[in-house]
Image (cartoon, rainbow, N blue to C red):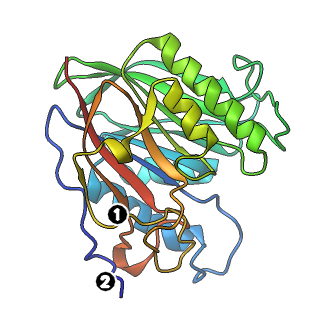
Amino acid sequence: MPAAPDDHPTIGAVVAPEVHCATLNLRRRVPHAAGHPDAWERRRDAVVALVTSEEPTVLAVQEALPTQTADLTARLGSRWEPVVVGRGARGGGEAVGLFLDRERLDVVERRTWALSRTPSRPGSRAWATAFPRHAVGAVVADRSTGQQFLAVATHLDVASPWARLRGAQLLGRIVRERGLPAVVMADWNCPAGSAPWRALAEAGVVDSWGRASRQVGEAYGTYPHYRAPRVGSRRIDGVLVTEDAVVERVAVNVRRPGGVWPSDHAAVHAVVRWDS
């Protein structure tokens, strides 16, 4: 039997020089009756409760519609700075992005890349995607350690294996070219160990799960879809880090604040540090 909703272990408090990185597909808002488990109006407070209780240093989100980004920005308050950009040519529409802990991090640079053959052209498509895919990044300076690192949020294509692979290869090149310690967080739309994850590992961006000193809780799949989480199911969401990172602990977070699932996906957390 699964534990009660709020009895699942959390990843624990984070202290300097650790950086708490988390990724969560918010599940885009679609029309539902108010009590439906997928209704944003039902899930919104659970997302806020999860974020404020876990206190990530860097949170990546996917499938954020403008109203959802506005809701989270208002409800999370001034502590977390949103760096969230839509996939359209002018930055509108469904978004991916970051919420950054202002108490810990200073934003040095913001960037957006199209996952296409023309990454500097917003809204561009390639590799048989039905609509644009993109990545949003920020170079941040950690005031606790003086370390700068690159944080990237993205969401690979759901339908095209070719697009997922080429998108992953592009992300690997972006990280290599920046030459900074990095964390890349995503709904990868493919399981850990598949071709896109391997392509990133070849570029030196590796799955935090296998490098962690400690795994907190069970190895749940990350797409429970509002049902009881299953150990050993596919982990399609993940936190990847450059090889210079020390990964202290990782978890798939299946907490349900107030008995409500925050999303159809489960959040993934990794606590990392970079030794100067």
- Closer to the observer: label 2 or label 1? 2
Can the viewer see residue 30 in this picture? yes
Query: Residue at the spot x=62%, y=51% of the render?
Result: 190
Labelled disc at residue 4 = 2
Left or right: where 13 falls relative to 123: left
Task: Classify residue 131 by image quadrant.
Answer: top right
Which one is in front, 47 or 127? 127
Are the residues flagged by discs 2 and 1 in contact, CB closer than 8 Å?
no
Looking at marks 2 and 1 on the same chain, the residue that comes earlier in the sequence is marked by: 2
Tell me the SS state at disc 1.
helix
Which one is in front, 264 or 246? 246
Tell me the SS state at disc 2.
loop
Disc 2 from disc 1: Cα separation? 16 Å
Q: Residue 92: where, in percent of width, then height?
A: 70, 37
Decide: is 219 above or below 17: below
Crowding at dot 1, Cα within 10 Å, few <14 / some 14-19 / many 20+, comes out as: some
Decide: is 57 above or below 150: below
**Numbered marks: total:** 2
Which one is in front, 50 or 7? 7
Left or right: where 186 falls relative to 128: left
Q: Residue 130: where, in percent of width, then height?
A: 84, 44
Query: Residue at the spot x=81%, y=31% of the render?
Result: 125
Q: Residue 226: where, in percent of width, then height?
A: 54, 76
Query: Residue at the spot x=39%, y=16% of the render?
Result: 180
Image quarter where the C terminus lies is top left
Image quarter where the N terminus lies is bottom left
Residue at image mark 1: 49
Q: Which residue type carries mark 2?
A: Ala
Left or right: where 185 falls relative to 180: right
Task: Classify residue 182 by image quadrant.
Answer: top left
Q: Which residue type carries mark 1?
A: Ala
